[in-house]
Image (cartoon, coloured by chain):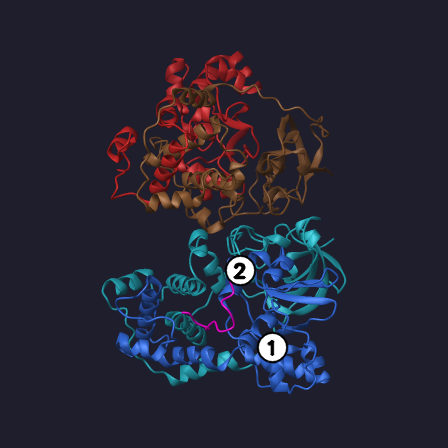
Chain colours: A cyan, B brown, C red, D blue
Amino acid sequence: MDGIHDLGGMQGFGPVEDQGADEPPFHHPWEGRVHGMMISLGANRALPGSFRYAIERMGAVQYLTTSYYEHWMAAIETLLDEQGVVSREALARRIEQGRAEPEQRLDPELAQRAKTALTAPSKRVWRGPDHRFTVGQKVRAKKDATTHSGHTRCPRYVRDVVGVIERLCPLEPLPEGLPTRDIQPVPLYTVCFHSHDLWGEGAEDFTLRIDLVEPYLEEV
Amino acid sequence: MDGIHDLGGMQGFGPVEDQGADEPPFHHPWEGRVHGMMISLGANRALPGSFRYAIERMGAVQYLTTSYYEHWMAAIETLLDEQGVVSREALARRIEQGRAEPEQRLDPELAQRAKTALTAPSKRVWRGPDHRFTVGQKVRAKKDATTHSGHTRCPRYVRDVVGVIERLCPLEPLPEGLPTRDIQPVPLYTVCFHSHDLWGEGAEDFTLRIDLVEPYLEEV
Amino acid sequence: MSTTAEHDHAHEDGTTHVGARTKAPAELRALALEAELIERGLVSTDAIDTVVEFFQNEVGPRNGARLVARAWVEPEFRGRLLADASAAARELDISGMEGDHMIAVENTDTVHNLVVCTLCSCYPWPVLGVPPVWYKSAPYRARAVREPRGLLAEFGLDVPADVEVRVWDSSAELRYLVVPRRPAGTDQLSEDELAALVTRNGMIGVAPV
Amino acid sequence: MSTTAEHDHAHEDGTTHVGARTKAPAELRALALEAELIERGLVSTDAIDTVVEFFQNEVGPRNGARLVARAWVEPEFRGRLLADASAAARELDISGMEGDHMIAVENTDTVHNLVVCTLCSCYPWPVLGVPPVWYKSAPYRARAVREPRGLLAEFGLDVPADVEVRVWDSSAELRYLVVPRRPAGTDQLSEDELAALVTRNGMIGVAPV
């Protein structure tokens, strides 16, 4: 979907504000807890579906007016609700009834799996069709790469623009399938675009690389 | 500029909510006062520059989280501040000091001019170059129709898309010149696009007409 | 109009009570702006009152409805309306700001028109007044040019697949007015009775009439 | 960890005091979520603590800096890092989530690299930790792919016109790490001293080193 998350090239968002090298990883304790819940749920295979797509469905105004970890929390809430694991109502009731204080529960085995997920290399290799395009080939990012209302990783700003294949990359699942857990491994490419093709002749002079799966691309 | 005001085709904004036929023109008395100030300032030629561009420069989050008449008020404040007529500081001071109650001031002649502006037909006709394109001709809305950071009336969703000239319209000042009061009358066209060219083959089937000035268009 | 109470009284629209204790920031800013501009002689109380009064009582969709009803009953007026809506409107003493280059687009058996302004909220004031909040809202401006059929369905208007949906994005100074189809079974109605059937939403294109 | 006080103590990061009276809605929602998931046995206090501890103390830009410094002093390691950054990182016992397909891109006399994720905020956790707020912010994600030179100038980095600015938008599962140019006059420094010069911003591409 062409939601507000697809920010590339938008103007009017103001300056970038760097808080400096001492910026902590988490700005509030709850942010760390949210990160920890996400990783723990993942280690328990309790958060299937598309986390990113759940964020993208937040709604534009809510997205822009909330922080990164609020996005994460919204996505966790959405996925758990949709899977019937924890309903939004249950969470609201808990807050209303003043039962929003977590009990302590220890599970060293889960803690170990969370740590392993964070630190161990993954051996996962996706098998599927061979790469159809070759390095140096001109391709166009399709106008309708997206399914119009679903999840995509083809941002609006590259669509209908011609670039050059720069690298063939290992296969990845087609993002469009992830919300329904439909895993279709497809070839991935690093594609090089020139800024003038992306933004017109008046734009700054630079090049841009972006990783796009084969179904997003067509021959020129 | 490709600001958040350029909303055409964006997704994730939720449903449209109709308040019904009885919706009042103004939802709060201050909204009517803002409309009245805008028209009165215009009748006094005290609001030059580009009102729309002043709105577009509000900033994305502020734009999305404020109402239409708040946009107008922001634009009036910006233009008056930039022209050195009323500074933002003067307004802030007035509020701080509790002097935000307007005195009564009558000016029947201005009231008459405001009423005339609202109701009298305008005879203004812009003279300039002849129309270069003809009805039925294929044209492309330029990729870099916009000046990248300034005012434009060529929305992002038609850029780089091919359409057909449907009507030659009376000349209008080039929107890009308005913020600096650089009046360049240019030919205007109604251009017809097909939804599949705008949004890809997967889109709904419909046609779209939009009025674009000649500098936004190029031959195909 | 030197006190808040008088101010409230003069401009009360029934939705909000403006008083020192209930002022939202926007209200306070508007008051400060008016106070400043009054002091500098750039606006006047009566000029602002005139504008408010105009939009509250003198202009609105009834004007557009008169044009539509006249077009329904007088084929020659219909022709003039479709040829030059601003000129046709002047015949009924309708004219003014945001209406000098109006274009009437007619719904037919094969075409349904829908008007939007994606970049701001352009609207033909002399025939429709000020736009409703939904017309100015982000969802409408975003969706009308991308999924108009889905949007119309949400408004209760299912446009058959063989009817062309024609969206008008008023990006320049032309202003659009939809002429809805005359409902069946209205042959006996007078022009005034017909005008009473025509709605603001119909003339934007999100309702059948 | 059954009371707020204990909770605060265990996870205090020095920036905010969480207590019943100061809870923002987000904090309250996070507490409710944890409480619910704990009750259902889907998460555990120690697993969450482990993750927090990991990002606060065990991972961060120091990892990336070690790789960069090693590449500066060992040409063969530099070759392996540029060929397969994840494999090279494993040589230094650096690996993990969001780092299985890392690609190192090297700044040179003629190329300056800049990394962004316009669609969300993808970032190579094993070498840089969690991203700073500015990297996740709308302004950065919007501007990096449109006016990177202007953006870099605001970060104090003026890239000469004859140097190619190369922006990497990490839209898939590859994660990018910039290898800055080794500063002049550092021939005498040890690998550890060199690593101390390398900053998070340098490895994203918004600082020279």
Residue A21 within the magenta-colored segment of the rendering: yes
Q: Is residue C183 visible?
A: no
Compute the Cα span from label 1 to label 2.
21 Å
Q: Is residue C209 above or below residue C91?
A: below
Visible residue check, residue C2: yes
Check disc 2 and report its element: helix, strand or loop.
loop
For label 2, the residue is A16
| Side of D25 where B187 appears, left or right | right
Q: Is residue A8 left or right of residue B38?
A: right
Q: Secondary structure at mark 1?
A: loop
Q: Which residue is mark 1?
A: D198
Image location of residue C149, percent across then percent down: 50, 39
Location of residue D136 in the rendering, given as x and y in whole percent from the top left corner: 51, 63
Start-end of magenta stretch: A16-27
Dominant secondary structure of the magenta stretch?
loop
**Label 1: chain?**
D
